[in-house]
Amino acid sequence: MPRSPSALHLAVALDGAGWHPAAWREPAARPGELFTARYWADLVTEAEQGLLDLVTIEDALSLQSTDLDGLDGRTDQVRGRLDAVLIAARIAPLTRHIGLVPTTVVTHTEPFHVSKAIATVDFVSGGRAGVRVKVSGRGDEAAHFGRRTVPRLRVDELDTPAGRAALKELFDEAADYVEVLRRLWDSWEDDAEIRDAATGRFIDREKLHYIDFEGDRFSVKGPSITPRPPQGQPIVSALAHRTEPFRLVARSADLGFVTPRDTAHATEIVTEIREAQTAAGRADETVHVFGDLVVFIDDDPAAAADRKAALDERAGAPYTSDARVFTGTPAQLADLLQDLQQAGLTGFRLRPGTLPHDLTAITRGLVPELQRRGAFRTEYRADTLRGLLGLTRPVNRYADV
Amino acid sequence: MSKPLKQIHLAAHFPGVNNTTVWTDPASGSQIDFSSFAHLARTAERAKFDFLFLAEGLRLREQNNQIYDLDVVGRPDTFTVLSALAAVTDKLGLAGTINSTFNEPYDVARQFASLDHLSAGRAAWNVVTSWDEFTGQNFRRGGYLAQEDRYERARQFLAATWELFDSWQGDEIVADKESGTFLKNPAPGRFDHHVSQFDISGHFDVPRSPQGRPVIFQAGDSEEGREFAAAGADAIFTRHGTLEDGRAFYADVKRRLARYGRSPDDLKILPGVTYVLGDTDAEARERADVVRHQQVSGQTAIKFLEQLWNRDLSSYDPDGPLPAIDPLVGENTVARGRASVRMHRDPLATAAQWRALAEEKKLSIRELIIEVTGRQSFIGSPATVADALDEFVQTDAGDGFILVPHLVPGGLDEFADTVVPLLQERGVFRTEYEGDTLRDHLGLGELRAGDADRRAAS
């Protein structure tokens, strides 16, 4: 599907003091304020001044660690965080246009609770809510809940048959979870509240629906306790690195975040997702695919590279990531994004290496550069996240049933 | 020498999902738009109230196998809307009901700790249990818990979350850029909790919050509930709104505190009450009568009666006499998902009382229901209401009130503008917030070090 260059979408991924483990030691970092509302409000307000489509807020149900299945005992990195959905809700009344997409771990939480929570962020923000669903295969997170065990998986085991089966189970459950979220959002028709004084009825109960979801892991009756939110259905997104999560994006999401190494890799990923989308019967629906990059941005390319090198030295190791790591100028980043976009990516989620430095470099350097090239909006032209992403408001699946 | 005057605590309940709200009134706004919640919260803060309170329900109520449609239906998620309200207020406490049956301690603790951080120390938790399998159909666990285990789970749930709240010391975030030390302790938040309902261990991921933990509320009146509150709650949300009932309840609960090493001031007793104001007492009484008839329509009265009778009574005339037939005893199959169902513990006895009352006062079904479902209401001119509220608190029938207005979003405005100044003139209600946290407003003092010891001993 060809898209005009101006349709490039931009998101920023917020996490702690930035994505580099030594980011919190930068002069402008505010590591003592990571657990305050003001810190998050300042970041999101800055992103909104840059006219970005949305921010995502990272989350997990365990302490951050370099070890994939437990604590690493380090005291030199940021540890601890606040619930991302509540951060999104706290910021919503302080912003007007930008989308708010908190992360939620679906393996251990209740879809009924999360459905109404995201619907409520949508009400509070006037239609700017989304959610990033994330599975957890961590043993320590499972022990925090004490209700199930998860197969212990190392990264090098993910491509074995056992690894694939375990991933399939986690992602199938995630797909069920998203199905429940969406059905619950639809479980009230938009005009269910009638306030008919003549008959004494507050709602028309014919316009409320049991969702009667039955899955392998759980069943949910419905309807929601929360009416249908302003967007009808808030945006569902997921980060995806391999086939199982690609399938989740293709069959369940509105937006996927992917991690291409280069343009050729981006083409492969987009092709795989589009094929899975067709297989899922969603060929006609818009599913955005955003490329993720970690960015260190300065006006002088050497300054950006030196800054990352200095951070690496403080951290004791060169920083690597699942996503491509960029260092350079706003113009170089704009070149790279436009090049990657040729592969069919519809936008980008940039992970600032340090906060606030690399965020302001995005909003005050990259964005004006893209605007000069006619590749990015110059004002917000929609009030909802769906509107910003060019997605229509979904018809309620239960209407006229 | 006269006794110093007690200070009154005031809170506001956002009314919804029952027949308190008069949604037919032209002044009635949205029950779901954030602007309604923000208006009520800002009014409460303008009036220097202690906190705003939100109730919760996890399944839409049903009657006769149909979703109940006569009252307000639909409400937001508790945690999320409270967090958003923290953005539009600075001092007001933010209290919400979160049940301990269909949640897990780790998740609830991190949400409350997060809310306490994001509100700078204003979070409160009304701990409740869910009562039926009906609600469980919306959750992974389903209806797995027998009724007798629910208080046990609630008790264990609270103990487990307590351990999580206490798992970080207050000073573990060092964040020293120069030395590169972010954390004092390489493995903070350690917890290990193995009891009949929970088998959990690991590390909590939210640093200690401004209040240490949320203020803990308990609602309800049963023997177990009173004891549960005396052992660990900071406030009780009660329905004992009359002077006599209130004093008896107050004395009983405050007496229980000593056996847990607590002083009477450690637990605030706050009845939920309604009010109707007027320029004169007579005008207020007239308005109250109109409000009660708006709240209890003929259809609503029949539905209430069905909840006790446990039968379809749709053929009865609400303006006529009570049914001659008796209630069906046993499991209530007519009404589901509604707290009042539980209150009818002996339906035949309650029906006999209602019959006697209806005969004595010559009441129709609707008039009877208006009479028996009203909670304590303060009705009168602002001066009359201020007198009554003050007397109630000074004579130890309570420590304050959770006010339930009957209009959203403006139902608190008149109270804030007329009654609050009178209470302030008497010197029984604050004119400015003296502290920043909800614990400060409620006069609960700092958390004591004994909390951790109590945990270790449990």
Image: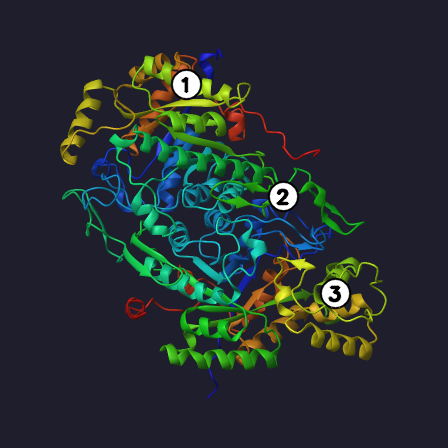
Type of amino acid under label 1: Glu
Horizontal relation, residue B207 to residue A129: left or right: left
Point 60% across, 73% down: residue: B241
Q: Looking at the image, is B288 positioned above or below residue A382? A: below
The residue beneath circle 1 is A272
Q: Are marks 3 and 1 on the same chain?
A: no
Mark number, residue A210: 2
Residue bearing the label numbered 3: B305
**In the rendered image, which quarter is residue B444 located in?**
bottom left
Q: Nearer the viewer, residue A266 or A145?
A: A145
For the residue carrying disc 1, how many other residues have a C-alpha within 10 Å: few (<14), some (14-19), or many (20+)? some
Mark 2: amino acid: Tyr
Question: Could you say where residue A328 lies in the image, as x and y percent from the top left?
Answer: 25, 19
Secondary structure, mark 3, is helix
Is residue A384 at all visible to an observer of this figure? yes
Nearest-to-viewer mark from 3 and 1: 1
- The front one of A295 and A307 is A295
Q: Is residue A335 above or below residue B391?
A: above
Instruction: Give how far apart the Cα atoms at labels 2 and 1 are.
Output: 35 Å
Circle count? 3
Residue A377 visible, this angle: no
